[in-house]
Amino acid sequence: MSRRNETRDRLEKLKSLWARGESLLIVMQNNPDPDAIAAACALRELANRTAGLNCQFAYGGTIGRAENRELVHYLGFTLHPFAQVKHQKSDLIALVDTQPAAGNNPLPEGVQPDIIIDHHPAIEASRGVAFADIRENYGATSTIMWEYLREAKITPDMPIATALLYGIRSDTQDLGRETTQTDIDAIEALYPLANKRMLGQIQRGRVPSDYYQMLSTALSNTRIYSHALICDIGSIDNADMIGEVADLLLRHEEVDWVMCYGFCDGQMLISFRTQDSSLDAGDVALKVVYKLGTGGGHEHMAGGQITLPSTKRPARLEGLIRRRFLNALRIRTRKSRPLVRIPPKARSGK
């Protein structure tokens, strides 16, 4: 079956499912990224236009990264923290860019979604869901949603087209990471419909002063182990900063692996990035959090989360995940050097 026919069949299944209710709660992951935000927005458009559903958005964590805040502001729709949403009153629940029990979304244990649309590797908890469209070979969930809009003969307006285009570019690093022809086709179709000026404005979203303080702390706490970097960003209230720093550190000319971790809202959050194709970042993430928490991802980027038993910083846990990370990469040395050196005068403030 061709890709287009497959999407057409799935769209008909979605319509049949939507006929069972009048309201749809669209749930994104904790700290939703541009791909999740854009895909959720496109799903609402599809549900509104094809079934007249009343849609509401919910997420967990925060929207901290500047580009994410700028994108939400541009789209002009309201995102609700999941804790403020009465999910029991929604006829249908959809998970976008995440899956049940993945550990990176706010859907309570025991609450089964009706719909999953995602591009991450399928997990066991997604079995049995009424409608699950999981295409792990796609570079972005936004690409999947573009195909649904196309099959429904819905031309997205400029804000949605801009969001979808930015979501695909962001998750594939401008088609440089885990990209397929489907992602390229979507970008070619969306580009004429998008607001080009806004694309640049989203990417250059303004940041507060404490952003630079967090960045300074992260760089000061980064160590180089052979061809890998490990960064301890510390305790933060902006979880998005962990992935952003990991992206930045991967640009270092001497390394091809990065693990960045921090502590936020009672969890240890970890981001993995790599340019090494001999190991899968998702597999490395699973090895690092094994029996400690949840994790997973793609070939070149992944994440993990570990719920902490107390507010005290777990030094033994930090040491364990560092050892597991280095062992997964087969780095035998435990000797490291700092990424940056702070001059004595700078430390004393003189």
Image: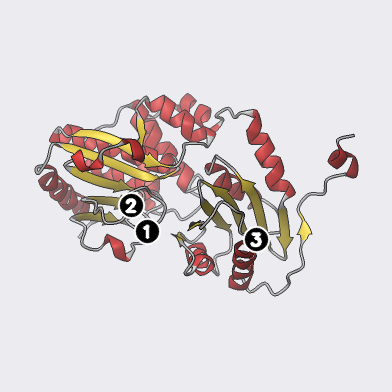
Closer to us: 85 or 11: 85
Q: Mark 2 or 1 closer to N-term?
A: 2
Quick one: SS at disc 2?
strand
| Label at residue 318 | none
- Color style of the picture: secondary structure
Q: Mark 3 or 2 closer to N-term?
A: 2
Q: Residue at x 47, y 35 (%)?
A: 68
| Label at residue 137 | 1
x then y, percent, for residue 221: 72, 51
Q: Nearer the viewer, mark 1 or mark 3?
A: 3
Q: Nearer the viewer, mark 2 or mark 1?
A: 2
User: Where on the picture, by quarter, is residue 324?
Assistant: bottom right
Task: Using residue 323 as the reference point, say whether residue 87 is left or right of it.
Answer: left
Quick one: SS at disc 3?
helix
Q: Nearer the viewer, mark 3 or mark 2?
A: 3
The disc labelled 2 sits on which kind of residue? Asp
- Can you identify the residue that label 2 sits on? 118
Q: Residue at x 17, y 49 (%)?
A: 8
- Density class for disc 3 (Cα within 10 Å; few <14, some 14-19, many ≥20) is few
CA separation, marks 2 and 1? Answer: 10 Å
- Density class for disc 2 (Cα within 10 Å; few <14, some 14-19, many ≥20) is many
Q: Residue at x 52, y 29 (%)?
A: 200
x then y, percent, for residue 69: 47, 31
CA separation, marks 1 and 3? Answer: 37 Å
Rendered position, 185 above or below 69: below
Q: Residue at x 17, y 36 (%)?
A: 23
* Residue 187 visible, this angle: no
The disc labelled 3 sits on which kind of residue? Ala
| Label at residue 315 | 3
